[in-house]
Image (cartoon, rainbow, N blue to C red):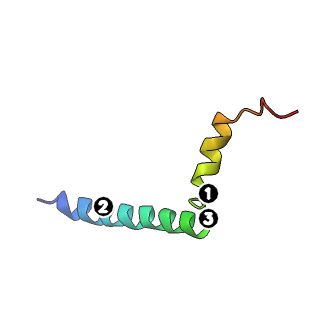
Amino acid sequence: MDILYLLVPLSLILVFVIGGVFWWALQHRQFDDLDHEGQSIIDDGEGRL
């Protein structure tokens, strides 16, 4: 039962850290253009001269 006094605060801290990183990623436009990077892997530039 004593371990809950450690695990509950640690899990709350982890939730806030993950939420903060997700918020930072949203604010810095990390999720804006997901299709471009996937398409750049497929298009290797072979048809352009």
What's the amino acid at mark 1?
Asp
Please say if the residues under marks 2 and 1 sit with CB atoms less than 8 Å apart.
no
Q: Nearer the viewer, residue 37 or 21?
A: 37
Q: Secondary structure at mark 1?
A: loop
Q: Earlier in the sequence, mark 2 or mark 1?
A: 2
How packed is label 3: few (under 14 Cα within 10 Å), some, or many (20 or more)? Answer: few
What's the amino acid at mark 3?
Arg
C-alpha distance separating marks 2 and 1: 32 Å
Query: Looking at the rendered structure, which numbered label has been put on residue 29?
Result: 3
C-alpha distance separating marks 3 and 2: 27 Å
Closest to the camera, between mark 3 and mark 2, is 3
Q: Residue 16 in the image: x percent, y percent?
A: 40, 68
Query: Looking at the rendered structure, which numbered label has been put on residue 33?
Result: 1
Q: Residue 45 in the image: x percent, y percent?
A: 77, 34
Q: Which residue is mark 2?
A: 11
- In this image, 8 relative to 31: left or right? left
